[in-house]
Amino acid sequence: MLIVAAMILPGTAGAERGGDGHVSILYWQAPSQLNPYLSGGIKDTEAASLVLEPLARHDHRGNMVPWLAESVPTLANGGVSSDLTRITWTLREGLIWSDGTPVTSSDVVFTANYCMHPDGGCARLANFEDVEKVEALDELRVMITFSKPKPYPYGPFVGATVPILQAAQFAECTGERAPECTEANFNPVGTGPFRVTEFRSNDVITMEANPNYRDPEKPAFATLTFKGGGDAAAAARAVLETGEIDYAWNLQLAPDVLAAMQDAGKGTVVSSFGTLVERLMINLTDPDPAHGEERSTRTHPHPFLSDVRVRQALSMAIDRGLLAEIGYGQAGRPTCNVVPAPAAYVSTANDACFVQDMEGANRLLDEAGWSRGDDGVRTRNGVRLSVLYQTSTNAVRQDFQALIKQWWSEIGVETELRNVDASVFFGGDPGSPDTYQKFNADIEMYANSFEGTDPEPYLANWRCGNDPRPDNQWQGGNMPRYCSEVYDALLDRMSKTGGLAERSDLAKAMNDMLMQEYVMIPLVHRGRVSAHVRSLGGVLLNTWDSELWNIADWHRID
């Protein structure tokens, strides 16, 4: 990890705020709300990043850079204590919320307590691993104290997923009340270059330049429209063929389709590899609706996916190379790991998955006592290998579903396919039965990544207790409902380890546990693929943070 003391980005073309008029952005997975602490969806986090900001983040090269903080605390500059139990952040002087009130250390303290509230359901709790307390030393300085030495103390408030909330706005929105604060969650007061003027959930957000933004010459655009809905193909056409939209995200399309659209000459496709992995998540718990509120909770183990041999056979039957080729072309690589980058953290212990092994999968199920019936579907002790496999609605994902269903049928597994509108699937609404957190299916497919270049906070998602469940508003990153004391012990060791080589070994060991217990089945290491019109300047695609991280520097060019 490289820490950069100051961030210098290309300036806007004009010298006055709002001088370039309007900019339009299209995320075909429409945001459901703008509070990253209540949603694990990338679409919500990235929309929120236009308004809410962290103390530090990672730039497009993966370097950690100060944002609302004046510098990144380290051992060398005295910001991290010699015993590694404390980190002290200092806010920039003169920061103002978009409503004109000052940003102070109390806002940072409040945000930490908001996420760590024992009755809340914080989607980012893994970022606050081992935090004992957060306290204001004065108006600008905040000290985070950890319960043990923390060689990597950058989980809290680093990256778009863990921004600072205004204490005054969210004061009555803590604990169980957090999801009920619609006004605050839809229209947060922020420090970013834009502020919300209208929010229509799962549809469109309109914004205007923040009049209190810290750089008086930015942003270049006076107004912004953040449109949601549709599909990846329509989003790509709107930029590459018609030019009616300035920027489109997540163009999950076959490579030949994108290339043909780009030939129209209106826009440019941009892509870069980071840590994004398309994967299958295995539900280790029983999603049977007969269990009521205990459905998909650790109270009830899954009737057949609790058998690791079944999970392994499902993985062995998949041709990852073919999926990567037809789904993403040069923007996809088959992967056998959930931690695909940076290179220092990439394991080679699971590389056997690169070769589809249908014969081996069938033999494994035979040996495990799963016998084929007259219809070709395997059963054991009256339990039928019949899975409900869900994902979000998207052409590439539906192609993947069809292929995987066929491969699984060849090993005696019956598969029912379901796709859910992406805005609902990733929406995080605790009242919806169709979110990926609720996981009311046997297997689900989606892509996820981690911010920055250190995987510790990401790997902490699969700690015991981080599973979504009724008492935490169905939030948390442990979708498989996995729990292992051995895994947690490795995570504890990593949280106390400073050396890169040892941290790498521990990360690989945890990755390998998840892979070799088939808690999840990685498919494709995806490059992020987006597009912008040729008249939009300043875009630096960032795979380590929000794609919209430097929107204050976007501008119109001739």
Image (cartoon, grey):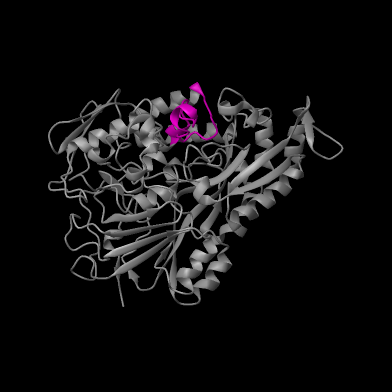
Foreground residue, 145 or 393?
A: 393
Foreground residue, 28 or 141?
A: 28
Q: Quadrant of residue 473?
A: top left
* SS assignment for the magenta stretch, majority: loop
Residue 316 point in image, percent of width and height: 67, 41
Count of picture labels: 0
Please say whether residue 370 is visible from this viewpoint: no
At a point 34% along the width and 29% down the height, the residue shown is 116
Q: Please give left or right for residue 343 compared with residue 333 in the image.
A: left
Q: Quadrant of residue 56?
A: top left
Please say whether residue 63 is visible from this viewpoint: yes
Q: Which residues are magenta?
A: 459-485
Q: Please give left or right for residue 30 compared with residue 254 in the image.
A: left
At a point 28% along the width and 44% down the height, the residue shown is 54
Residue 514 point in image, percent of width and height: 54, 33
Q: Please give left or right for residue 284 compared with residue 111 in the image.
A: right
Residue 215 point in image, percent of width and height: 18, 58
In the image, is residue 64 above or below residue 223? above
Q: Quadrant location of the C terminus?
A: bottom left
In the image, is residue 335 above or below residue 362? below
Foreground residue, 337 or 430?
A: 430
Q: Quadrant location of the N terminus?
A: top left
110 is within the stretch colored magenta: no
Residue 174 point in image, percent of width and height: 33, 32
At a point 30% along the width and 29% down the height, the residue shown is 150
